[in-house]
Image (cartoon, grey):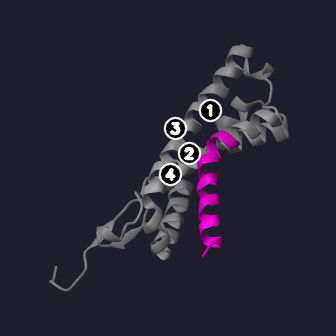
Amino acid sequence: MTRGTPKVVSIGAGVDVQDRHRCILDDRLPGLLLDALTPVETAVLSAVSGVPYCTIRTIVNVDEIRKREICAAVQAVVTKHREVFAEYHGVLEFIVPFMAVTASQADCFLILADASRNESAMSAEPCSPRKALIIALIVLGPLALFGLVLFSKWRNR
């Protein structure tokens, strides 16, 4: 490699970025965000369709190819708007894993609730709209609060 040529480094999800320091956010965050959204999406679909949570949960998972495509798109947005993400990268690197852990706990809770109520998945009940809303608020709450803080900061400029 010649002295003036920048080194190309893969940061995961099929995205190559010149020089590792250009990567603003951890490349695992988009995948964690998708994983955090899965129980919310499943609960909402269960409430709307009337199908039990466990039944929908088995078909909602995003396949790895689609997940890599979405992660690559998120990394491209991060690269394009690097100033914004550089300013708030610490907050995002806290919020997204926190959401993923909370979502994982909510997912376990909903699966165990279905299993404890009924021995077979055929007799399980769907999520109620109230339960789906509570799961969405618990999981998405930190991101929503961050969005409100950004909005109020933007509005006061």
Q: Alpha carbon of mark 3 to alpha carbon of mark 2: how far?
A: 9 Å
Q: Residue furthest front?
A: 156
Q: Is residue 62 visible?
A: no
Residue under label 1: 106
For marks 2 and 1 on the same chain, the one whose residue lies earlier in the sequence: 2
Task: Quarter of the image for the C terminus: give it.
Answer: bottom right
Q: Are marks 3 and 2 in contact (CB under 8 Å)?
A: no
Asked if residue 150 is among those painted magenta in the image, a careful observer would answer: yes
Q: To which residue does mark 2 refer? A: 35
Instruction: Name the amino acid, label 3.
Output: Val
Dot 4: element: helix
Label 4 belongs to which residue? 31
89 is higher (above) or lower (below) than 62: below
17 horizontally vs 49: left or right: left
In terms of sequence position, does the residue under pointer 3 or pointer 2 come before the other? 2
Q: Secondary structure at mark 3?
A: helix
Taking depth in this image into account, of 86 and 109 the one nearest to the observer is 86
In this rendering, is residue 12 above or below 48? below
The N terminus lies in quadrant? bottom left
Q: Which residues are magenta?
A: 137-157
Q: Residues within 10 Å of mark 1 (few under 14, many from 20)?
A: many
For marks 4 and 1 on the same chain, the one whose residue lies earlier in the sequence: 4
Q: Earlier in the sequence, mark 1 or mark 3?
A: 3
Disc 1 residue type? Ala
Instruction: Name the residue furthest bottom.
Output: 4
Sooner in the amino-acid sequence: mark 3 or mark 4: 4
Q: Amino acid at mark 4?
A: Gly
Q: Are marks 1 and 3 in contact (CB under 8 Å)?
A: no
Q: Which residue is mark 3?
A: 101
Q: Nearer the viewer, residue 18 or 88?
A: 88
Tag 4 near tag 1, CB within 8 Å: no
